[in-house]
Image: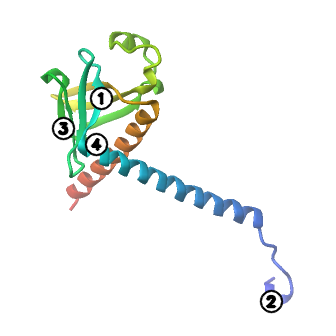
Amino acid sequence: RSASSGLRVPALPEQVEEARNELEDHADDKQRLWDLTFAFVRRAVNGIPITVLRPVRQPALFSLDSALQRIEIVGDSKEQSLTGGLSNVKDIWLAGERPDPAAAASQGIDEGEEERVVHIEVFAGGGVERWPMLVGTPEDAAEFVQALTVLRIYNIENEQAAGHK
């Protein structure tokens, strides 16, 4: 029966409230990720000091171009430098997400530094290269991975869309 026949359909306030809260949480998460990515971009365009952990531990600078399409790691030597498109990045992760004690020891990572290590894998020269790097704080490392992942996905989607035009 309809509500006009005198029968009231009860509201579902609990489910409605849960749905509203879920939408608000999603909007908050989306805004937080946008803010984090924007702050990272501002820093990365100007260059972020890092320590490259390959082949030996050396200071370097990580940067993004102003079009947000290319990354650059500039170290003291060619072995510690990388330039490439963000769409050539295969994966990005925190060392703590995929613990590898043997790799940590071979890369000279001291105890307590692992949570500051970011790994970037890039397609290069017909293969895949892993670029472990040490960044400022554990929070910086988490933001680095989140923001760079967003930018990587954005670049891949833009390239795919351009290819389908």
Which amino acid type is marked by label 4? Ala
Which residue of the protein is positioned furthest toward the left in this rendering?
78
Left or right position of 87 against 134:
left
Disc 3: which residue = 84
Disc 3: CA contacts within 10 A as few (<14), some (14-19) or many (>=20) = some
* Quadrant housing the N terminus: bottom right
Q: Which mark is residue 117?
A: none
The residue at 30%/52% (across/down) is 157
Query: In this orientation, which residue lies closer to the viewer: 99 or 8?
Result: 99
Q: Position of residue 148 (x, y in %)?
A: 34, 42
Give the Cα separation between the discs numbered 2 and 4.
62 Å
Position of residue 61 measured from the top left corner of the image (x, y, whole percent): 23, 32
Q: Nearer the viewer, mark 3 or mark 4?
A: 4
Label 1 vs 2, first from the N-terminus: 2
Measured in 3D between alpha carbons, the distance from the residue under mark 1 to the one under mark 4, in whole angstroms, is 11 Å
Residue drawn at x 39%, y 10% is 102
Say which quarter of the image contains residue 20. Answer: bottom right
